[in-house]
Image (cartoon, rainbow, N blue to C red):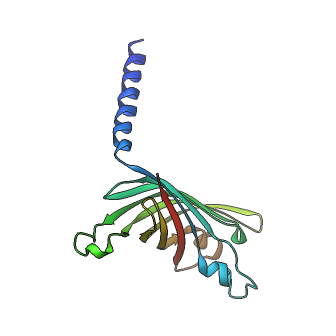
């Protein structure tokens, strides 16, 4: 019986601390697409563009942003899910005219699920990210995101020697 009370107290303290931390932050929802894939498609012989969509949700404060992401690219039977952390660079102290911009860099890691010729693969992924946000309104704006990503699925399916790919995205964000 005593163990149950200890566990209850620990859970209460954990939730209380989490509440205090989260209270200092704002939520953020972001929606991105890859413009190159929309225009050219994923392959050199693609006849049309395809939608590569990424959704990110997380917490943001003055110094960092962290959360989860999901990327879906149906043309490649590609789904990626993971967590990210970006450290913000405060340039407005140096250049006040950039006060509508927000710059950040960070890391993400997760897993890729891919199906090729009825063969399923779950593989590790990690990336270096750089992002620029422009605030149109106080809580809403446009964003440019670039990442240099390790793609474990390329090693599994294609035995590639260079599984690192650069990708660029344009998107919208909303803070609440």
Q: Is residue 35 left or right of residue 125?
A: right
Counting from the top left corner in percent of width and height, residue 76 is at 69, 71
**Residue 152 occupies quadrant:** bottom right
- Note whether residue 16 is visible: yes
Q: Is residue 80 left or right of residue 90?
A: right
Which of the 4 quarters of the picture holds residue 123?
bottom right
Locate residue 90, reporting x and y percent: 28, 67
Residue drawn 50% across and 71% down? 150
Q: Is residue 86 above or below residue 20?
A: below
Query: Which residue is the extreme one toward the bottom?
Result: 45
Residue 49 percent across, percent down from the top left: 70, 80
In the image as oriented, which residue stretches furthest toward the top?
1
Query: Residue at point 45% right, 59% down?
Result: 139
> For this rendering, which residue is in front, 64 or 23?
23
Towards the viewer: 13 or 43: 13
Q: Position of residue 125 (x, y in %)?
A: 52, 64
From the viewer's perspective, is residue 29 above or below residue 104?
above
* Foreground of the two, 10 or 104: 104
Identify which residue is drawn at 42% across, 55% down: 66
Camera-nearest residue between 30 and 130? 30
Q: Is residue 164 visible?
A: no
Q: Quadrant of the N terminus?
A: top left
Give the residue at x 54% y 73%.
170
């Amino acid at each position: 019986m005593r163990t149950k009370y200890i566990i209850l107290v620990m859970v209460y303290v954990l939730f209380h601390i989490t509440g205090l931390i989260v209270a200092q932050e704002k939520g953020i929802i972001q929606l991105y697409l890859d413009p190159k894939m929309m225009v050219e498609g994923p392959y050199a012989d693609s006849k049309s563009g395809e939608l590569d969509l990424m959704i990110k949700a997380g917490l943001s404060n003055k110094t960092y942003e962290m959360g989860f992401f999901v990327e879906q690219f149906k043309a490649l039977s590609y789904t990626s899910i993971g967590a990210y952390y970006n450290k913000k660079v405060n340039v407005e102290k140096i250049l006040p005219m950039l006060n509508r911009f927000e710059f950040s860099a960070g890391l993400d890691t997760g897993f890729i699920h891919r199906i090729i010729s009825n063969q399923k693969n779950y593989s590790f992924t990690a990336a270096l990210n750089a992002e620029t946000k422009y605030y149109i309104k106080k809580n809403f704006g446009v964003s440019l995101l670039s990442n240099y990503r390790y793609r474990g699925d390329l090693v599994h399916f294609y035995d590639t020697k260079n599984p690192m790919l650069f990708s660029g995205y344009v998107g919208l964000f909303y803070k609440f």
